[in-house]
Every structure is written in C-alpha cells, then in structure tokens.
Image (cartoon, rainbow, N blue to C red):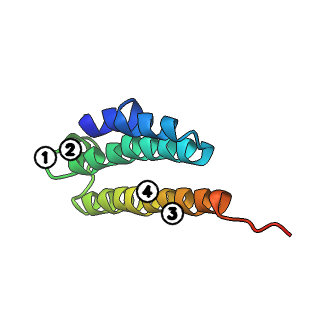
Amino acid sequence: MYILYTAWIGEVTKLSQASNHPVVKRGVRTLAWFVLVGWAIYPIGYMCMPGGWLNTAFGLGSENVDLFYNIADAINKIGFGLVVYNIAVTSTKETSYQPTT
C-alpha cells in the first residue's frame, strides 16, 4: 500500500510535479499504473493454485499459476523498464546541449 501511495500521490508524484518536465510527469503516471494494474495480476495466479477459488470454480490446473506469474513478470519488469528507459532517453534528448550554427 505504501508503494501505491508514493507512486500515486506521495513522494514520487510530488518529485515529478516539481521537475516541471512533461515527459517525467507522464512517465511517472504510467509507472504508477504499472504498479497498480501489473501487481493485480499476481493474485490471479495465486487463485489458480490448487485449492484456490479459480482452480476450484473453473478447473484450472496448477500450470496456469506459472502462466499468470510469467505474464505478470513480463508486464511489470519489461514494461516498467521500457517506461523508465523512455523517460531517460526522451528527457535527455530534450535537455541536451544543442550547438547553434
């Protein structure tokens, strides 16, 4: 809950607002969505475990646990990393020195 708080209205958001840089602001908001939505996928995998209500209700096997965790990991780790990379590259291009001719 603390990480969600800092990503949405806490320290991280306040720092991005203070930067007054549109790429950073937009990127931090995207990262906050990754935390919220991406982390919500993990409980689905947990509910597919033997004894979980998705396993019981829909007859999903334990192999689905790995599938949901792999999807969640791909979304969270790869997507999160690409957003951070995009923030760094885009903000660097916009603020880098441009010689005048």
CA distance separating discs 2 and 1: 6 Å
Residues at marks 3 and 1, CA–CA distance in whole angstroms: 40 Å
SS of the residue under disc 4: helix
* Figure quadrant of the C terminus: bottom right
Q: Position of residue 61 (x, y in %)?
A: 24, 58
Q: CA distance from mark 4 to mark 3?
A: 9 Å
Q: Which residue is drawn at the image coordinates 50% and 45% (left, top)? A: 30
Mark closer to the chain start, 2 or 3: 2
Whether tag 2 and tag 1 are in contact, CB under 8 A, the answer is yes
**Would you call the spot at circle 4 few (<14 residues within 10 Å), some (14-19), or many (20 or more)?**
many
Q: Amino acid at mark 3?
A: Tyr
Find disc 1 in the rendering and name its residue.
Answer: 51
SS for tag 2? helix
Q: Residues within 10 Å of mark 3 (few under 14, many from 20)?
A: few
Residue with the mark numbered 2: 56
Q: Using the image, tell me which numbered label, if any, was put on residue 85.
A: 3
The answer for how far apart the CA atoms under marks 4 and 1 are is 32 Å
Instruction: Identify residue type, mark 2.
Output: Thr
Residue 99's quadrant in the figure? bottom right
- Mark 4 or mark 3, whichever is nearer to me: 3
Res. 67 mark? none
Residue 89 as seen in the image, left or right of residue 48: right
Q: Nearer the viewer, mark 2 or mark 4?
A: 4
Name which residue type carries label 1: Gly
Q: Quadrant of residue 94?
A: bottom right
Residue 80 - label: 4
Q: Earlier in the sequence, mark 2 or mark 1?
A: 1
Q: CA distance from mark 2 to mark 3?
A: 41 Å
Q: Are marks 4 and 3 in contact (CB under 8 Å)?
A: no
Q: Are marks 2 and 3 in contact (CB under 8 Å)?
A: no
Q: CA distance from mark 2 to mark 4?
A: 33 Å
* Mark 2 or mark 3, whichever is nearer to me: 3
